[in-house]
Amino acid sequence: MASAVVLVRAGGESETLAASSDPLGAGAAELEHTLGEGPSRDALRLGRPVLRADLLDGDPRWVAYGPGLAGRGLRSVFAFPLHVGAARFGVLTMYGREPQQLDPLRTTRCLAMAELATQVLLRSTEAGPQGGLARALDDAMDLRVEIFQAQGMAMVTLRTDLATALARMRAHAYETERSLHEVSLDILAGRLTLTDERSD
Amino acid sequence: MISTERLSALFVEVADTLVDDFDLVDFLHNLTDHAAAVSGADAVGLLLADHHRVLRFMAASNDTGEMLELFQLQNSEGPCLDCFTTGDPVVNAELVNAAERWPRFAPAATAAGLRSVHAFPLRLREETIGALNLFSRTGSRFASDEVGVVQALADVATIAILQERSILRAEVLTEQLQGALNSRIVIEQAKGALAQMEGSTPEEAFDLMRSRARATRRRLVEVAADVLDSIGQQRDRP
């Protein structure tokens, strides 16, 4: 890839540039923002990757952005949303100078990078000492449905957003030395209710 | 065992859904319902693999189906996992005789009142991307021609995943699969939130969202996202 950019949602619907590998990528993100169309926006809106092997392949999406980016010497673009269900944090977008397909190995690598970036962003919403890359990697694989259901419940009882709800569940798991999954099962069974009283 | 009348109804609906506005998660839920009706199975579940080749729950015809799929995932054993690993169907497996093959899954499924199980791979060229499970309370057995029909249902699921004008684009599979997996998470989050609001179970919350989606002809994932949004708005209001 020629360039990579991470955009982070800064409240509301707008995304701001959080990291860019080089000026080319920053310029591409700027172009998308100016024109109001492009892969990063689509990836966030659709909640799925938006992968375009060749911007000049005749696909009618992005009438201005496609040729615009090609004019800057970038021909392929691959955008991966940074999200956990309805909790949306941003998007990781990679740009290539040549038309190119993502083979399965590179697809997996990009998805893994997006997953890691999501975990890091999720961590940044957390208060408390725990965190760190190793733990983020541990939890990245924990995708059990009970955790998401419990997250929804905790969001209501804590009167907070999904990301904070998950952070509180993790904090509780850490304090009680149990796994996130065990804590989730307790919440689902009504054995545990996280509340927004800050006495704990 | 296979109801041809219901099968025709299914293919008509499939043809309908594949043309216009289409949502993969809704479609796969409907497919599990149809697969249950067509085959006479008591529960049907569907798992899809993520980019780590880890299977994840995607759809089921009822609570029993979901519970049995989750049990397989949690215990890393069962017909769906075998089928996914080998790429071959598991047909006419009698749970009573399967304690050796699936030491945790077989007794649990038997205790839930089930007697037989079948699993069919979702195959795309040489790759297996998921599996369809059929569970029965009676010892249902498929004849060889019926096996072909149920495998066709699994193939319909694969076709649906790839549906989009440019089916030949390799990226479509990644886009669709990842989109569906995240939609599933949105739905689970909304199930929990709605259950907490309504004092119901997550399953009841799911049924409520599903009937809302049907009544308003909207996508399940949109209804789920609305549930989460409206809770957020109530919270942010002073």
Image: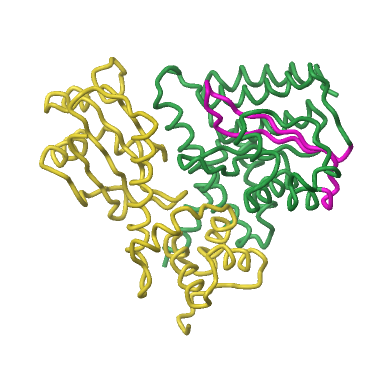
Q: At x 76% / y 32%, what residue is drawn?
A: B36
Residue B14 position by quadrant = top right
Colour that chain A carries in the picture: yellow
Q: Residue furthest right?
A: B138
Q: Main secondary structure of the magenta part?
A: strand
Residue A53 position by quadrant = top left
Describe residue B104's horizontal placement relative to residue A27 as left or right. Answer: right
From the top left corner, tell me how far across and down residue B51 is, in percent: 45, 39
Describe residue A6's horizontal placement relative to residue B198 as left or right. Answer: left
Q: At x 86% / y 44%, what residue is drawn?
A: B96
Q: Can you say whether B184 is above or below B229 in the image?
A: above
Q: Can you say whether B170 is above or below B219 in the image?
A: above
From the top left corner, tell me how far across and down residue A196 is, in percent: 48, 75
Q: At x 38% / y 71%, what residue is drawn?
A: A130
Q: Which chain is green?
A: B
Residues shaded magenta: B110-138
Describe residue B90's horizontal placement relative to residue B236 as left or right. Answer: right
Q: Which residue lies furthest to the bottom in this view?
A: A199
Q: Residue furthest front?
A: B100
